[in-house]
């Protein structure tokens, strides 16, 4: 360790010009790191080598992100490889969660007839299906579904519950 107190060969507050790091400004207007600012540095594949790796205007990046090939790539399960964009999924896969891009309301099992949309970013981040939506039933009618969902009503669950009651 350096006797001056720093362990990198520099005294506190002293930084070699070659090793100084530039800190990027974060724009809070967008959640997507790619679209920060008027131009985004995006590396893309093109058959023309002179076009690869150049700055692309934000509008062009947004247009590319709406393109079908991009959507197919983004809306694909990281665990099983099924393409949600093409309405494919795997029933037993945690990230798919048994549905593609939309599903019936998971709170009331579709009785309210509302459709929920997949939160692709969260599904990929946690490798577990995440959905955005609201149940259309009034709160007092939703309550029994919440209780049912979090209560084990199987024979084994009830038997264990009764056994726990008798030992207390």
Image (spheres, grey):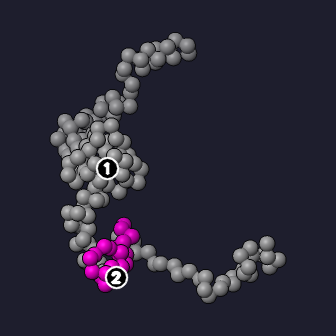
Q: Position of residue 128 (x, y in %)?
A: 38, 46
Q: Nearer the viewer, residue 152 or 11?
A: 11
Q: Is residue 138 left or right of residue 157?
A: left
Q: Circle 1 is placed at which residue position?
A: 81
Q: Nearer the viewer, residue 111 or 118?
A: 118
Q: Secondary structure at mark 2?
A: loop
Tell me the CA gap for discs 2 and 1: 30 Å
Vertical arrangement, residue 105 with respect to residue 157, above or below: below
Residue at 36% x, 42% y: name it: 94
Q: Is residue 147 visible?
A: yes
Provide the residue span drawn in magenta.
31-55
Q: Quadrant of the C terminus?
A: top right
Q: Is residue 131 left or right of residue 14?
A: left
Q: Quadrant of the N terminus?
A: bottom right
Is there CB contact under 8 Å for labels 2 and 1? no
Q: Is residue 117 visible?
A: no
Vertical arrangement, residue 96 with respect to residue 27, above or below: above
Instruction: State the mark number for residue 66.
Output: none
N-terminal of the pair, mark 2 or mark 1, is 2
Mark 1 is surrounded, within 10 Å at the Cα level, by few (under 14), some (14 to 19) or many (20 or more) other residues, namely some
Q: Residue furthest left?
A: 113
Q: Circle 2 is placed at which residue position?
A: 54
| Magenta stretch holds residue 68 | no
Q: Position of residue 119 (x, y in %)?
A: 31, 53
Name the quadrant containing residue 108. Answer: top left
Vertical arrangement, residue 21 with respect to residue 115, above or below: below
Q: Secondary structure at mark 1?
A: loop
Residue at 65% x, 85% y: name it: 16
Q: Is residue 128 left or right of residue 70?
A: right
């Amino acid at each position: 360790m350096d006797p001056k107190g720093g362990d990198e060969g520099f005294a506190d507050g002293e930084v070699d010009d070659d090793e100084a790091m530039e800190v990027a400004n974060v724009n809070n207007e967008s959640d997507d790191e790619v679209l920060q600012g008027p131009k985004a540095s995006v590396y893309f594949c093109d058959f023309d080598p002179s076009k690869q790796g150049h700055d692309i205007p934000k509008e062009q990046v947004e247009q590319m992100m709406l393109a079908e090939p991009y959507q197919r790539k983004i809306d694909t399960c990281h665990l099983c490889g099924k393409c949600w964009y093409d309405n494919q999924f795997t029933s037993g896969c945690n990230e798919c969660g048994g549905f593609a891009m939309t599903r019936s309301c998971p709170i009331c099992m579709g009785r309210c007839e509302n459709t929920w949309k997949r939160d692709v970013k969260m599904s990929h981040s946690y490798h577990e299906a995440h959905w955005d939506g609201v149940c259309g039933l009034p709160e007092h009618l939703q309550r029994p579904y919440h209780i049912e969902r979090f209560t084990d009503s199987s024979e084994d669950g009830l038997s264990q519950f009764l056994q726990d009651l008798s030992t207390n």
